[in-house]
Amino acid sequence: MIRQVSSQVVYSNAWMTVREDAIERPDGSPGVYGYVVKADFVVVVPEEDGGFHIVEEYRYPIGRRSWSFPQGSAEADTREDEARRELVEETGLRAAQLDFLGRMDNSHGLSNQGFHVYLATGLARGEANREHSEQDMRQRWVHRTKFEQMILSGSVSDSCSIAAYTLWLLQHR
């Protein structure tokens, strides 16, 4: 097991902290491990009529637009409420039923952040209430086979959405 010898914050802002830890490996040799500390988030799989509602927006870190399931930050004690809020905010949809599909690690070699996946069904339409940073967001419904084609073509490249879809598939076979 790796043992932490010391830890220091090397960068921090309102959304994330970067830590650098001095470590000791099982054989006693020293090392350094840098990682991002970031709050967990929710991913919502809005399922309806054999398909899913997805959103597209410009993602600054990758420099292009990308399709994904609705997602956003999650307070530890209000994850289901946050999933409902993100769904309404990004799509205008309200779910009669929200089921927890599972929790996954987002990037376990780089960050402590995880995500919580919810299936939203019994959808009712309403107005989206997007944040200012989501002003270029688009939404559409796609059939499941189209969603799979979008994964294969790379237009859905968000690993969290693909992982959420995998959880959905495993529970629906």
Image (cartoon, grey):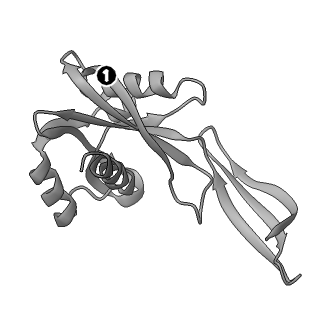
* Res 130 seen here: no
**Residue occupying image coordinates x 66% and y 61%:** 35
Q: Nearer the viewer, residue 100 or 80?
A: 100
**Residue occupying image coordinates x 11% and y 39%:** 50
Q: Nearer the viewer, residue 36 or 147?
A: 147
Question: Residue 43 lies in what quarter of the image?
Answer: top left
The x, y position of residue 141, in whole percent, is: 13, 37
How many labels were placed on the picture? 1
Tell me if 56 is positioned left or right of 116 in this view.
Answer: left
**Residue occupying image coordinates x 28% and y 43%:** 57
Question: Residue 151 lies in what quarter of the image?
Answer: bottom left
Task: Give the quarter of the figure containing the N terminus.
Answer: bottom right
Q: Nearer the viewer, residue 128 or 150?
A: 150
Badge 1 density bin: few <14, some 14–19, many ≥20, Cα 10 Å: few
Q: Is residue 76 above or below residue 57?
A: above
The x, y position of residue 153, in whole percent, is: 16, 65
**Kind of residue sitting beneath label 1:** Gln
Q: Secondary structure at mark 1?
A: strand
The x, y position of residue 42, in whole percent, is: 45, 37
**Residue occupying image coordinates x 30% and y 29%:** 120
Tell me if 135 is positioned left or right of 99 in this view.
Answer: left
* Res 153 seen here: yes
The residue singled out by tag 1 in the image is: 97
The x, y position of residue 136, in whole percent, is: 26, 37
